[in-house]
Image (tube, rainbow, N blue to C red):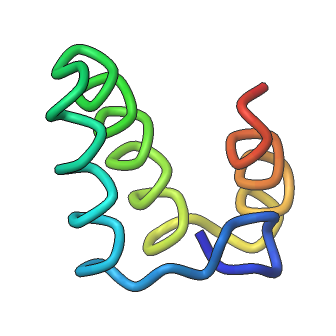
Amino acid sequence: FPIDYGGSGLDVLSYCIVLEEIAKACSTTALINLSHVLSSTSIHLFGKNNQKDFYLASLAKGE
């Protein structure tokens, strides 16, 4: 996520590297994280500003 919404600001490649390292320890955790990020990315790319404000900060916090 962008820093504006409480994310780390990682680019896609950096996220993939982190996810790969997580998967080495626990593939289930990596898949759960990936499904979370995929749904959040849809909101970030295609959502309206009020939807982004409402959902993304909460999702970045893990709520």
| Foreground pick, 25 / 27 | 25
* Residue at the image point whose x is 31% and y is 33% from the top: 35
Q: Place residue 26 in its image quadrant.
A: top left
| Quadrant housing the C terminus | top right
**Farthest residue in the top direction?**
28
| Quadrant housing the N terminus | bottom right
The image shows residue 40, relative to residue 3, as above or below, that is: above
* Residue at the image point whose x is 61% and y is 81% from the top: 9
The image shows residue 11, relative to residue 60, as above or below, that is: below
| Foreground pick, 27 / 51 | 27
Q: Point out residue 38 in the picture as x, y percentages from the top left corner.
A: 32, 48
The image shows residue 2, relative to residue 29, as above or below, that is: below
Question: In the figure, is residue 1 to the left or right of 5?
Answer: left
* Residue at the image point whose x is 27% and y is 31% from the top: 30
* Residue at the image point whose x is 81% and y is 41% from the top: 58
| Foreground pick, 44 / 13 | 13
Q: Point out residue 5 in the picture as x, y percentages from the top left corner.
A: 79, 68
